[in-house]
Amino acid sequence: MIRLAIAYLRDRPLTTALNVLLLAISVAMLVLLLQFGSQASERFERDARGVDLVVGAKGSPLQLILSSIFHIDQPTGNIPLSGLDLLKRDPAVARAIPLALGDNFNGYRIVGTDAGFSELYQAEIADGRTFSAPMEAVLGASVAADTGAGLGQKFIGNHGFGDEEDGAQGHDHAPFETVGILAPTGTVIDRLILTPVESVWDVHGIAHDHEGGEAHEGHDQGSDEGRGGHSHNHGDHDHGAAIAAQTATNQPAQASSAVLQASGGLEPELTALLVTYRNAAGAIRIPAMVNRQTEMQAAVPATETARLLELLGASLEGIRIFAWLLAVTGGLAIFVALLNMVRNREGDLALLRVMGASRVQVFATVIVEGIITAALGAVLGWISAHLLIMVARENFPTLADLGLAPWQPVSAELGLIVLVLAIGAVAALIPALRVYQIDPARTLARA
């Protein structure tokens, strides 16, 4: 009966192809929605784990969360270094991790931070060691795999976040040196380059004191002792002159910026702070204190992530409804095709009955034909959806930043395929019943 069903399908290739295509499109859309909803929400939850509050410059709270936790948007601005001291002194704060952003290497963000950032994501060193001095860098697992960078290799950071590579300004005067590579964690840290906060200031010619206390967690005091433990102001050395020379051929605005940096006119700043509370009381008091009593803003990751998923949810629901309508349309197309087949081949089916085929066998032939059509559509749609994810990941950096994996099936996909097979079976049910009720003698007499 299966061979006969396949033969009937091959006998009308255009109709079969159209039915398969309709179901494949609907399945592909539904699989894409399942993949995005499952992987994105899981990634958001995993990357934000352990972060109770993000403090940054005034602006959009959602933008602050996206740029500081998920690293997929532009920062809202910079905040004064004193904000870190303010939160670290608060008894309700267990941990405040500084972030200094602004540069990238091959599209991967360079993050100035301290040792607490690696601890937050439970990242371990797979090769080498952690950074202990400015201009030392530790690469995330994805960064190392993609760039092929190894220990001891030096690289130049570019200004910006890799979204606009044309005309990117490289900081040739301040190369980074790779001293460590992190083991894969499945979190956002895999695609980041970590370095001390001081590195970001040095790259941009911002004068700072290496003995600045709270501003330099993760900075090895032993390296300061190696320099005599002196206060190191980059405005007093040739570093500023190197910046001025490096930008001398750039536009006047860039040259004037270099002169400002060389003169020590810029103050050390941070981009954001990742805060973890010591107790529940902090969740009530600290956000209000930051928003009302400082020039900074406080954003709660759980709240903003839920709002983002809610905004996306309405659009995704509309697409999901459309996809199911396509699936139902595909089922109706199978129904019409099989019904026409039964009408056109009543004589053949009656002859099968005369040759010894039972009612059940003939009935099953039509049902199998509907299921095979649905199965072809389901398999084609599933493969197409995952191929689309793979292609989109390569061409749209934001999807890669979200960590969408092209070949990571979710359990709901199996249920989806079963439902599509059920649609094929139900669509074939009425034509199959018509075949079941055929009287071979009358049908052959009319023929």
Image (cartoon, helix red, strand yellow):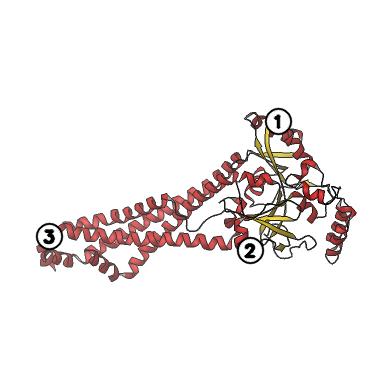
Q: Quadrant of the image for the N terminus? A: bottom left
In which image quadrant can residue 212 be found?
A: top right
Q: Do the residues labelled 3 and 2 touch (CB within 8 Å)?
A: no
On the image, numbered disc 3 is attached to which residue?
A: 439
Left or right placement of residue 42 versus residue 56 in this view: left
Disc number lying in front (3 or 2):
2
Mark 3 or mark 2: name the one nearer the start of the chain. Answer: 2
Left or right placement of residue 185 versus residue 261 in this view: left
Q: Separation of disc 2 and disc 1 at Cα? A: 42 Å
Numbered badge on residue 245: none
* SS for callout 2: helix
Mark 1 or mark 3: name the one nearer the start of the chain. Answer: 1
On the image, numbered disc 2 is attached to which residue?
A: 147
Viewer-closest of 46 and 239: 239
Q: Are marks 2 and 1 in contact (CB under 8 Å)?
A: no
For mark 3, does the 10 Å Cα neighbourhood hold few (<14), some (14 to 19), or many (20 or more) residues?
A: few
* SS for callout 3: loop
Residue located 53% across and 63% down the image: 391
* SS for callout 1: loop
